[in-house]
Image: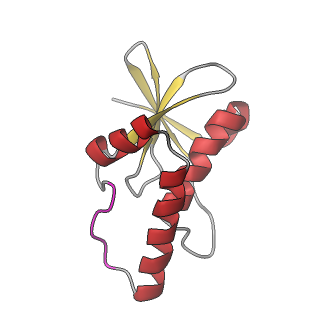
Amino acid sequence: MGRKWDDDVELDEEEEAAEHRAQRFLYRHLSRWQRKSLRENGYFMVKGNHTGDKYRVYFDGDDSVFRVRDDCHFCLSVMDENEYEVPEGDRVLARKLLIQGDEETFLAVANRTPQP
């Protein structure tokens, strides 16, 4: 995957402060194992509340989430259509909470792309 946790990205001071706040907020909502995985791999695992499927939620700049089923992955990207840039940490946390709290809605609104 592309970008990883705390990767250097050129931002102005206000954007940088927002990114750091969002990353700290995300970090507080992750388990110890999720934080470790995010630091080491650039993603963490989340269990869907409806199907029980496991998902890899990436911190990579392109809203990547992969559903893992019997070693088969499907890309589930939620596209941001906002007029302003939402910090990556906030977008990652939103996907995590949606998968954990309302997986059916996540699956309904996500763009599915089979992995090659």
Quadrant of the rendering where the C terminus is positioned: top left
Q: Nearer the viewer, residue 54 or 110?
A: 54
Task: Tell me the residue at 36%/45% (across/down).
Answer: 38
70 displayed left or right of 92: left
| Magenta part of the chain | 5-10
Tell me residue 102's x, y (percent).
72, 35
* Quarter of image, res 103: top right
87 versus 32 height, above or below = below
Tell me residue 104's x, y (percent).
71, 31
Task: Tell me the residue at 40%/86% (across/down).
Answer: 12
Tell me residue 59's x, y (percent).
40, 51
Task: Tell me the residue at 59%/76% (across/down).
Answer: 84
Q: Nearer the viewer, residue 57 or 116?
A: 57
| Dominant secondary-structure state across the stretch colored magenta | loop
Task: Tell me the residue at 37%/53% (across/down).
Answer: 60
Reply yes or no: does residue 12 show up in magenta. Answer: no
